[in-house]
Amino acid sequence: MIKSFASDNWSGVSPEIMEAVTVANTGHNAAYGEMNDPYYHRALFEFEKHFGKDIALFFVYNGTAANVLGINHLTSSYHAVITAKSAHINEDECAAPEKFGGNKILEIETGNGKITPAQIKPFLKSTGFQHHAQPKMISISQITEAGTVYSIEEIKAIADFAHDNNIYLHMDGARISNAAVALNAGFREFTRDAGVDVLSFGGTKNGLMFGEAVLFFDKNLAAGFKYLRKQGMQLHSKMRFIEVQFETYLKTGIWKKNARNANAKAKYLAEKLNEINGVKITQPVAGNAVFATLPSGIIPKLQNRYFFYVWNNDTSLVRLMCSWDTTKSDVDDFTELIRYEMSK
Amino acid sequence: MIKSFASDNWSGVSPEIMEAVTVANTGHNAAYGEMNDPYYHRALFEFEKHFGKDIALFFVYNGTAANVLGINHLTSSYHAVITAKSAHINEDECAAPEKFGGNKILEIETGNGKITPAQIKPFLKSTGFQHHAQPKMISISQITEAGTVYSIEEIKAIADFAHDNNIYLHMDGARISNAAVALNAGFREFTRDAGVDVLSFGGTKNGLMFGEAVLFFDKNLAAGFKYLRKQGMQLHSKMRFIEVQFETYLKTGIWKKNARNANAKAKYLAEKLNEINGVKITQPVAGNAVFATLPSGIIPKLQNRYFFYVWNNDTSLVRLMCSWDTTKSDVDDFTELIRYEMSK
Amino acid sequence: MIKSFASDNWSGVSPEIMEAVTVANTGHNAAYGEMNDPYYHRALFEFEKHFGKDIALFFVYNGTAANVLGINHLTSSYHAVITAKSAHINEDECAAPEKFGGNKILEIETGNGKITPAQIKPFLKSTGFQHHAQPKMISISQITEAGTVYSIEEIKAIADFAHDNNIYLHMDGARISNAAVALNAGFREFTRDAGVDVLSFGGTKNGLMFGEAVLFFDKNLAAGFKYLRKQGMQLHSKMRFIEVQFETYLKTGIWKKNARNANAKAKYLAEKLNEINGVKITQPVAGNAVFATLPSGIIPKLQNRYFFYVWNNDTSLVRLMCSWDTTKSDVDDFTELIRYEMSK
Amino acid sequence: MIKSFASDNWSGVSPEIMEAVTVANTGHNAAYGEMNDPYYHRALFEFEKHFGKDIALFFVYNGTAANVLGINHLTSSYHAVITAKSAHINEDECAAPEKFGGNKILEIETGNGKITPAQIKPFLKSTGFQHHAQPKMISISQITEAGTVYSIEEIKAIADFAHDNNIYLHMDGARISNAAVALNAGFREFTRDAGVDVLSFGGTKNGLMFGEAVLFFDKNLAAGFKYLRKQGMQLHSKMRFIEVQFETYLKTGIWKKNARNANAKAKYLAEKLNEINGVKITQPVAGNAVFATLPSGIIPKLQNRYFFYVWNNDTSLVRLMCSWDTTKSDVDDFTELIRYEMSK
């Protein structure tokens, strides 16, 4: 059984989810998540417990699609999206937002993956100038790609700034459960109540098999989205198998159990690494990622046993991701290995 | 346990597939189907048994995507795609091909869902005329949306015509297994060997949970396709769960077992319907679909117990789809119900 | 000096227009048609005389752009546009609407280029069905590509039908002046007052050098259009040279003078052709186009002296376009030539 | 007669051009620049004198289109374009490249508008990584948006780097004539011979009325471009009026006469400004632009008489553009005005 610190999507499916998928595999069920599909309503019921009533909920296949379609639905092609340079939608979607929406992405260089109203404000000079794409969307990742977490206040400040300027706020919640655990807050507090307009709610990095949810907190904003989903090649036929995963994920509380484990193991890993001379933690560990510099010579040897990604070759900066299934002994064994390789 | 004749995607997942998915859920595995992912290679190995060596194989989420990306990859935006009016890419993708590729779809009105070189030829008048989208792709569905099957000779004739005119041939194989059973032929005979350039190989309608394969039979044509897949929002992270389905589907032969059952039950259903006065079969039954006209008054009552779709309200034409899990007693019970309702 | 019956864009620029362009070439002027550009306001003033106040007026480069951008601005990508099969946007824009907007075009086969509510209605079955592009725009050409003219009542009927079904009405007015002359009506009567929402107002086929106007009759519908124009690569820098053409076109009445001549010469040409045995007029002549069948053998010889396009090789159907500069002697000479060639 | 230092497109049309347009307005001429259009061949003949044989030449409406279509034609949607942050295609096209091509633009922060291989190189790390848009095009502006000029050697270095890495080089030549004058070189030396693959050849900023040329220096690369032009809404019907402008522009040498005047006046303006205490030139003056800081208080008063654009409000940086029609007395009068306002 391979283990790694490569990514939280190298891990498999949480057993509770796999069981729910298996149980859902009974008889016929209305395809495409239509209104006559009971699984849809059960999943919606669970989401409403967390986010309140009057939400619009849609399932798509993955995070790329949740981000691209959610943003595209609330913008015209001549609108610009403001985000961190490191944001997934900017750097890791192979230009999917540009292709599907035609939008320009305006990037903000950050050290920690988080953006602020002060950094966003200069882009508003373009407003009304017909030669420039018009700012209409701000997108933030929670947890960020740098492993940091926005506080509720920080999100509120961005949302207020956005709405004061007739701009929407999107949140890429690929690791939203890890954020909730890190903030010790309910989902709603740092999304809907903080002013987020459209949310990509991910689960694959925390124990699901496939699927991602798009939530609009003003149902009016969601009008027509189902057509965009289909046109975006994101309408699953046997939809129950996505729906039942999210129902189970929320209902059983494994979203929290899994995220707690991943976050705790990252913290533990950081502690253990801190004890090693010559290893340096470069970002405060808020979620399930640990960014650290290692002696470059030992990296290939470590990767042979526990694969992980080098973030910056020049500085030997590596990203170590913990997952819902990372164990204490994984961490112990891995850090032991580091010590051993460094001692040679 | 609900049963229906609504669609072959109202049924669930074949038990062999569910088991394989469960078994694959062990430990960590390289994400995104990269070269270091063993599941990819095992799936490729099975495909090569059917299609031969030197194929380019990619997995995407669904049939919409397989069709749109496969076609898009081999065309420029000013190219036109020629297909049957009833083709999924023309009528049932909510303009996904137009959105993603910008292509114009040129439709051919057919009675039976099949197109011929003679019907395609007039569109070639546009060749070289800069005001018209340029024909560059022909797309056929096997089995067609009308439930009919192209013979190998018919496909060859289209492919030869296409290639003589510098045009590619795409096949939408959403129900390719049903076609293979209907033709009593191997996949390769009516695809690669018949001249198909790019194939959407589906399984969800025949017992898979999610995922669809795109196959290019000339590897050179596939250069860069992995980027298009990502940009098309179709790159799954936990890819092993798609790959293992296709590996199992082909390796265990359930593609054939399932398709045989669905086709056989459709044939049986047609026979039973034929015995009923006032019911009329409107298309020869080649695969797993039965098109028939029913007395309009009884349709809602039948739908209450066995849901199915009305294809044409004016003529009371209905489509009855059999699935991998349709049983003889489903058919017996359903046709009994028809007789009963008609007798009232 | 070459003459032809090829197209009304083979002719040159009306002398009044050329003079206005020359006169406008004085000193510096605000670029891009911004609010501080007096030429814009003068052109707007003339348009308001014809169409009334509270219109939104934009200039683009050509008819393709006016049609594509006008339609695109009022639709989402998952919307469908219903139009005649023969419509320019369907057949003669090399898939520009599909590329720029992603929309599906739903075509209606017509004999005479005109569509009716009864023909449009069946497409509305798709409304609400997520697999189908959603009808949101009807586009009509006035004069049609078949040379016919919609009556005011016919346009009103389509507009009422459209608005009853939450659909917009677009008019491709590439030959709108010829239509006004044919109807003996003011522009406003068969556009704004008849219920058209967005109009492409062309002039290049009637004596202008370049440029086309897009008019929205509800200014609210035009919000943001200036950004779409720029993004659509249609914002001219030295805009005064488009604006002054339209100002002059409307102010001096040459729109009417030119169109009257073109229409009258087409009528005269039709009369002369009617007198020739073996020549048959196939469409009533309403504007400046004459569709006729000629003996196929003489066509190349005629084309040598007066070029024109063959519309259908099989039936020897040709299109003969009269222009603002077509003279009685052009027609006399051309018809003499036909008689001569037929006598050989 | 208004004068300004706002932009070289606030000026009108060079008299030689206006005359040529007027003279071309005779009789009928084949529309759309087809092969039977003599004006096309005459324009091509002039271009070949400068660029050599075996070029592919196309006319479009403006610089936005020339840039977007030229780049789009040589890339797939998943390709990235590397350019200076200040490049027109990045900042001043309202996301036209993203909309039309779906490409991601990767920007390089520069002080002077010029990029180097060393700055481009880091982006190549993305090559082969499926999550990142793939670098395939480098675009440089000659003259740059900062008023600077690439030397021939600098262009060659970029071209060699590009071709070594399977990347194309595009040049935005909106002010290419000013560059040729600044470099005292022929067009060919710093484009085709330096390794540029596709060139936007502009003239509107140097005395033309409308139109821009796209040149491919390898004809094979241009295959199909005419369809893309049409689909891009850039095919002019009365094409002779673009073609004759470019023919005249090159044949009469006014490209050089006009550019020489604009460049010389900019140099003269810079000299005069340099003599004024409190005014500072911020970029070496290579072409027809002068960037300078002025006392902020007097800017509105100056703009009343000679409009110009403020480039940076915080630093009172302004851009003063000279044009083909800027005179010595314009400069004298303007600088006098500055002295006068500063003395108050």
Image (cartoon, coloured by chain):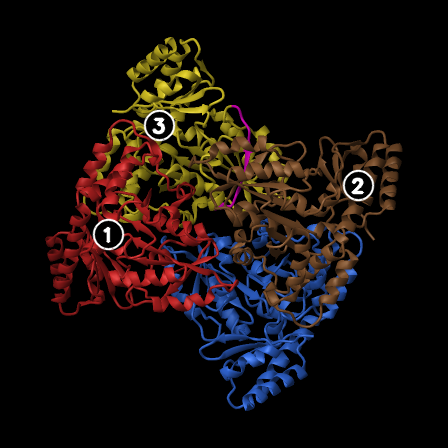
Chain colours: A yellow, B red, C blue, D brown
- Tell me the subunit letter for badge 2: D
Q: Nearer the viewer, mark 2 or mark 3?
A: 2
Span of residues in magenta: A101-111
- Gap between marks 1 and 2, in whole Å? 71 Å
Disc 1 residue type (three-letter): Phe
- Gap between marks 3 and 1, in whole Å? 37 Å
Question: What is the quadrant of residue D27 in the picture?
Answer: bottom right
Query: Marks 1 and 2: same chain?
Result: no
* Mark 1 residue crowding within 10 angstroms, few (<14) / some (14–19) / many (20+): some
Q: Nearer the viewer, mark 3 or mark 1?
A: 1
In the picture of the structure, the residue carrying the numbered disc 3 is A8
Q: Which mark is residue C327?
A: none
Query: Marks 3 and 1: same chain?
Result: no
* Mark 3 residue crowding within 10 angstroms, few (<14) / some (14–19) / many (20+): many
- Tell me the subunit letter for badge 3: A
- Gap between marks 2 and 3, in whole Å? 59 Å
> In the displayed structure, would residue B243 be above or below residue C325?
above
Q: Position of residue C238 (x, y in %)?
A: 71, 54
Residue name at image x 35 percent, y 35 percent: B32
Residue B149: tell me if it is visible: no
Disc 2 residue type (three-letter): Ala
Give the SS element for disc 3.
Answer: loop
Q: Position of residue D231 (x, y in %)?
A: 53, 57
Q: Is residue B282 left or right of residue C181?
A: left
Give the SS element for disc 1.
Answer: helix
Q: Which mark is residue B187?
A: 1
Q: Position of residue B339 (x, y in %)?
A: 12, 63
> In the displayed structure, would residue C182 be above or below residue C198?
below
> In the displayed structure, would residue A266 be above or below residue D2?
above
